Amino acid sequence: MLLISCPNCGSRDETEFHYGGQAHVAYPENPNELNDREWAEFLFYRDNTKGAFAERWLHSTGCRQWFNMLRDTVTYEIQAIYPMGAPRPDKAAPAPESGTASTAPDSTTTGTAAPSIAATSLATSTAPASTTAPEGATK
Amino acid sequence: MADLLPEHPAFLWHNPDPKPSYDAVIVGGGGHGLATAYFLAKNHGMTNIAVLEKGWLAGGNMARNTTIIRSNYLWDESAAIYEHALKLWEVLPEELEYDFLFSQRGVMNLAHTLGDVRESMRRVGANQLNGVDAEWLDPKQVKELCPILNINDNIRYPVMGATYQPRAGIAKHDHVAWAFARKCDELGVDIIQNCEVTGFVKDGNRVTGVKTNRGTINTEKVGLCAAGHSSVLAEMAGFRLPIQSHPLQALVSELHEPVHPTVVMSNHVHVYVSQAHKGELVMGAGVDSYNGYGQRGSFHVIEHQMAAAVELFPIFARAHVLRTWGGIVDTTLDASPIVGTTPVDNMFVNCGWGTGGFKGTPAAGLTFAHTIATGTPHELNKPFALERFETGALIDEHGAAAVAH
C-alpha cells in the first residue's frame, strides 16, 4: 500500500487514488499530419521505465484532482509530487529557493524516510499549455 | 552424520561458461526462453545456441505463476495459439520424458452478472466453433463439479453460472522448466545462468552480439524472452515496445486435504483458486495498477482477493495465508502477446503475455523458434506481430477471454 500525499488533501492511502499512467504525454499538436506509426506511438506506446518514472494519479475519492508523481518503479519510493502541467522536477531547472506558494498542504513523501526532491516548491512553475488536462487513462 | 547424506541427484543440465559465439542467443531462461531453445534445437536443428539467464533458471515469472493452463479465449487468433499450446501440453510430458504432473482437472470461469453470463455464453459458442472444449454450466452444475463453492444468493455477487473447459488444468511449473532445460541440455543447448545482458552489439541496424556481465557474445540472432523486463532490453537495443510492467501477486495457504477438485476463476470478484498436488490452495490476485519492477505489490490487492475467496469458498475462512509473492507481468493494451520481428534486424521478441504466459509456454516456444529460425512468423503468431499496433488489427482479449487483469 502506497501512502500518497495528495497536493490538496494530504497523505491518504493508495486505495483512494486511481493510476493514470505516464505523465507528460501531450495530445499531438497536428493530429491530421500524423501517420499510422505516430498514432501508434501516441495511443499505445508508453515509457516503461525501470527507475524514476513520472506518472499521473487521480485522487478519485478525495478532491478528484489529477496530479503528477515521480516514483521509483523498483523501490516504489515516491520522490516528488507536483501539479499537472509543471515540468518533471528531476529534469527541470533548479527550483527557486524561496517565495513560491505551495499547493500541497502536506509535502511529506510517503512510506520511507527518504528526502523529497522539494516537489512542492515547484508548484507554481510555468506550465506548458498542452499538458494541463489529463490525457486519458491508459487502462 | 555427513556420510549418511544421500548422493546429490543427477544434475539435469550443465552450467557451461558462455562460448565466444552462437548461432542464436535467447535472452531469458524462464519457461518461454527454454521452450524456444528446445524447439529451435528439435524442430530447426539449431543446437549451437545459448539461453542467457540473469538470475537462476526459471526464477522469474516461471516460479511465480499460478500454473493454470486453459485455451478458452474468445478471438480466433487467440483460440488458435492457446489451443495449440494446450495440445502441446497434452503430449509434452511424453516428448520431454518428464512427468510434470499436468492435471486436466478443468477450469471454471464464474459469471456473477448478467453481463458476465452473456459474455460467457458467447465465449462458449466461439470456443466450440474453434474446436476448443467449452460448456456452459448453471449454478447447480457448478455446485456438482465444485461442492465447496457457495452458490447461494446470500453473497454480494452470487454465482449465476460458469463456463467450463474440461481439458484445462494445472501443472507443476518448476518441473515444466526442468523438463525443458534437461532436454535442451541433451540437445546441446548452453544454459547459462547468472549471465545478465547489459547491452547489444549492432552493425548498422543488425544485431551481431550481446554484451553481458560475463563478456560479449557474438551471435547471428537474438530472441528476447524477458517478460517484465522486455522494455528494458528493447531500450538497450534501441526500440520501444507497447508494454507496461506491473506487479502481479499470488499466494498459497498451508497444506490441506484435497477439497478443491478443479480450478475456479472469477474475474468479477477477482480471485482464481486451485489446489496444488501437495495440498496448498494456490490463489492469484489482480495486478497492481501502477507500473512496477519490484516483484511485490500492495497489500490491499491481497486483501481484496481474500475477501472474494472467502465469500465464494466459505470453507477457506479458517485457512491461513502461508506465503505471498509478486512477479512482474508485461501487459499490452489489447491483453495479447507480441511474438515476432522487431525494428532491429535479426532481433526477435516474445513478450506481452501479461498475466497468462505460463499456459502459452509451449506455443510461445514453438512459434518463436520458427520465427527466429526462418526470419518469418509461424502461422499461429503472425497476428501477434508488433505491427498490429500500427495497423489497428488488435486482438482485444480484455474482458473477452476470461483474462483476469
Image (cartoon, coloured by chain):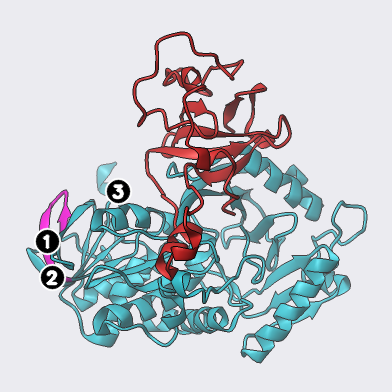
On screen, residue A32 above or below A88: below
On screen, residue B19 above or below B229: below
Residue A44 counted in the magenta span: no
- What chain is colored red? A
Residue underneath mark 3: B4
* Residue found at the far right of this picture: B153
Q: Position of residue B181 (x, y in %)?
A: 30, 68
Q: Chain of mark 2?
A: B
Residue shown at 37% from the left, 80% from the top: B366
Residue underneath mark 1: B217
- Give the mark nearer the N terminus: 2 vs 1: 2
Residue B331 at least partly seen: no
For the stretch drawn in magenta, the main secondary structure is: strand
Label 3 sits on a secondary structure element that is: helix
Q: Is residue B270 left or right of residue B118?
A: left
Residue underneath mark 2: B22
